[in-house]
Image (spheres, helix red, strand yellow):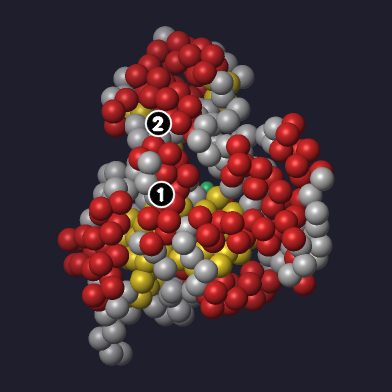
Amino acid sequence: MIDLRSDTLTRPTDSMRAAMASAEVGDDVYGEDPTVRRLEERVAELFGHEAALFTPTGSLANVLAVRSLVGVGQEVLCESSAHIARAELGAHGAFTGLTMRTWTDPRGQVALTAIEGLFAPDMGPFFVETTAISVENTHNFAGGAVLPLADLQALRSWTSDMGARVHLDGARIWNAHVATGTPLDAYGAIADVVAVCLSKGLGAPIGSLMIGSADAVAEARIWRKRLGGGMRQVGILAAAGLHALDHHVERLADDHANARLLAEACGVDPAAVDTNIVVAQRPDAAAFVAAAAEAGVRISAVGPRAVRLVTHLDVSRAEAEKAAAVLAGL
Ligand SMILES: *Cc1c(COP(=O)(O)O)cnc(C)c1O
């Protein structure tokens, strides 16, 4: 089976497992795990922020990040298929007590005119107050689309004028970085808080980080514990993340090339595939997924007429070529 359902499916490599096994550890709730500290400091520096916090999931990193900008009864604006709106099971409403309003863009892009129309500054006891805008780069449900740096900078400058703040869901920011050559700190500079995942394309078995100011991260540390995410000798997992940063960033270019190959085989314009995710339209997505599985390729349906293919560390060029031949023949 060639498994193209998600880039979360990767298994740690032998050398990653060796790095994990030999990690120096301590109790991270006491702030005494040297490997976690190294990872947090390194990632904060990569994005040009003061501090970072290791979390078990990207969903928790997003909850902590967004709640640092948006309080009870306030709102965050985001694109309508954003992960925070669709795929975190209502965590932001359930835990933070915020609401969301959305704009819709088929490529998940920053639609500044729509955002200006939605934005509601404090208008007294009438309307929900907007305090933050959230953007997702790359955009998962828009097929791994990259948000151009210039658009993010324009958003940043507009929010600064309006007194609003910016959250970047950067679960796959590494893919955007490799696909465009944009430095990570340039992405860091357009947001007050960033969430990044180590467990997607980077191939770690678990782990994400919330990145921001020292104050925001100190408060997030309290909320992480409150929500049950305080972890102990977790350097064993942080070591996997450090190993991934050393060895699995630049190779994302291979995943992007494999995704373009698969796009072509599925009749999708490869030029429209920015990174490692291909979304293809099929009259009956479920039937196509079943036929692909029958032929040895696992993909997922993301709508009644849409299928999704994701390339990753555990799919070699030869496997991508084989999957492309299978899918082209269906
Ligand atoms: C995967 C993902 C997350 C976090 O997901 P977890 O499964 O909770 O780690 C957040 N945002 C985006 C865009 C994602 O794709």
Quadrant of the image for the N terminus? Answer: top right
Question: Residue, x 27% and y 62% (percent of image)?
Answer: 155
Name the residue at 40% across, 31% down.
278
The residues tagged by marks 1 and 2 sit, at their Cα atoms, a distance apart of: 24 Å
Residue 246 in view: yes
User: Vertical placement of 72 versus 18: above or below?
Assistant: below
Check disc 1 and report the residue beneath it.
Answer: 183
Q: Which residue is mark 2?
A: 278
The disc at residue 303 is none
Amino acid residing under circle 2: Val
Up the image or down, 78 lies above or below 183; here it is below
Residue 18 at x, y percent in the picture: 78, 38
Task: Provide the secondary structure element on which disc 2 rests.
Answer: strand
Q: Is residue 206 left or right of residue 84?
A: right
Nearest the viewer among 15 and 169 is 15
Q: Amino acid at mark 1?
A: Pro
How many labels sit on residues?
Answer: 2
Secondary structure of the residue carrying tag 1 is loop
In the rendered view, does 71 fall on the left or right side of 267? Answer: right
Q: Quadrant of residue 78?
A: bottom left
Q: x and y percent of residue 123 in the render? A: 25, 86
Asked if residue 105 lies left or right of residue 327, the reply is left
Image location (x, y in percent) of residue 110: 27, 55
Name the foreground residue: 221 vs 238.
Answer: 238
The residue under the point 56% across, 67% down is 51
Left or right of 236 on screen, residue 39: left
Q: Residue at x 28, y 25 (%)?
A: 269
